[in-house]
Image: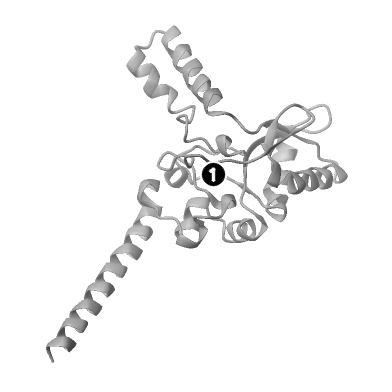
Amino acid sequence: MKRKMILLALLVSIMITGAFVMNKCSIAKKISVSVLNPKDDTQNDWRLILVNDSHAVPMNYQFELTRLSNGICVDSRIYPDLQQMFDDARSSGIYPVVGEGYRTHEEQQNMMQNKIDSFISEGYSEKDAEKLAQDWVAEPGKSEHELGLALDINADTSLSSDEEVYSWLAENAYKYGFILRYPQSCEYITGIDYEPWHYRYVGIEAALEIYTKQITLEEYLCG
């Protein structure tokens, strides 16, 4: 009898704990990205590494780079899908170009420092300049560009407009494993304002689900 009571108590405890975790994740979607918990089964999938203000680039993260014709580098594993996406876009009369790809940690630090210096030159104190810069530039170590999986894609303006490229990507990028990383009206989840040019590789399966459900990467990993 005593053993049954102990087992019953453990079962009740587990049920309460599980309910709390699920509720925490649900609330997080509405309030803050800082409490989102990635799915356990995605932690070892390089395509689904979460990097944002609350999640830094993993320590000792390593990968090979492929240099594009314009000198921009990307993770070599995404290059075939990226090339196919661009080939298909051009076949449709749309001419995208990669403006930003992989950045080293040092390059991200320089971007942050340059933005801080810019605000200081405008008359802000160093403390205020640092705070303002964080609204414009990701903290070094917390930028997806350091993964080599994030791209800023714009137009070859001699052949297409940015709006044409953004529209084509919004409708088609998921077919090649890319998602619009910072959608409109999702700033409260991603922590980043809408960026129609910023795409992140997550693989075709995840991209299809994210596109179909119209959710963010944070929400996908929390689901």
Q: Quadrant of residue 63?
A: top right
Q: Is residue 81 visible?
A: yes
Q: The residue tagged with tag 1: helix, strand or loop? A: loop
Left or right: 98 as drawn, with respect to 219: right
Q: Nearer the viewer, residue 73 or 157?
A: 73
Residue at 32 percent across and 63 percent down: it is 21
Question: Residue 222 in the image: x percent, y percent?
Answer: 45, 58
Residue at 40 percent across and 42 percent down: it is 54
Question: Residue 80 in the image: x percent, y percent?
Answer: 77, 47
Instruction: Reply above or below: 119 against 131.
Output: above
Q: Quadrant of residue 70?
A: top right
Q: Which residue is mark 1?
A: 184
Instruction: Reply above or below: 219 against 156.
Output: below
Instruction: Reply above or below: 162 against 42.
Output: above
Q: Nearer the viewer, residue 14 or 153?
A: 14
Q: Quadrant of residue 145?
A: top right
| Colour treatment of the image | one colour
Left or right: 128 as drawn, with respect to 4: right
Q: Residues within 10 Å of mark 1 (few under 14, many from 20)?
A: few
Question: Residue 196 in the image: x percent, y percent?
Answer: 62, 39
Residue at 51 percent across and 35 percent down: it is 143
- Report the number of discs: 1
Residue projecting furthest to the bottom: 1
Left or right: 119 as drawn, with respect to 155: left
Residue at 39 percent across and 17 percent down: it is 129
Query: Is the N terminus in the top left, top right, bottom left or bottom right quadrant?
Result: bottom left
Q: Amino acid at mark 1?
A: Gln
Question: Residue 192 in the image: x percent, y percent?
Answer: 48, 38
Q: Is residue 223 visible?
A: no
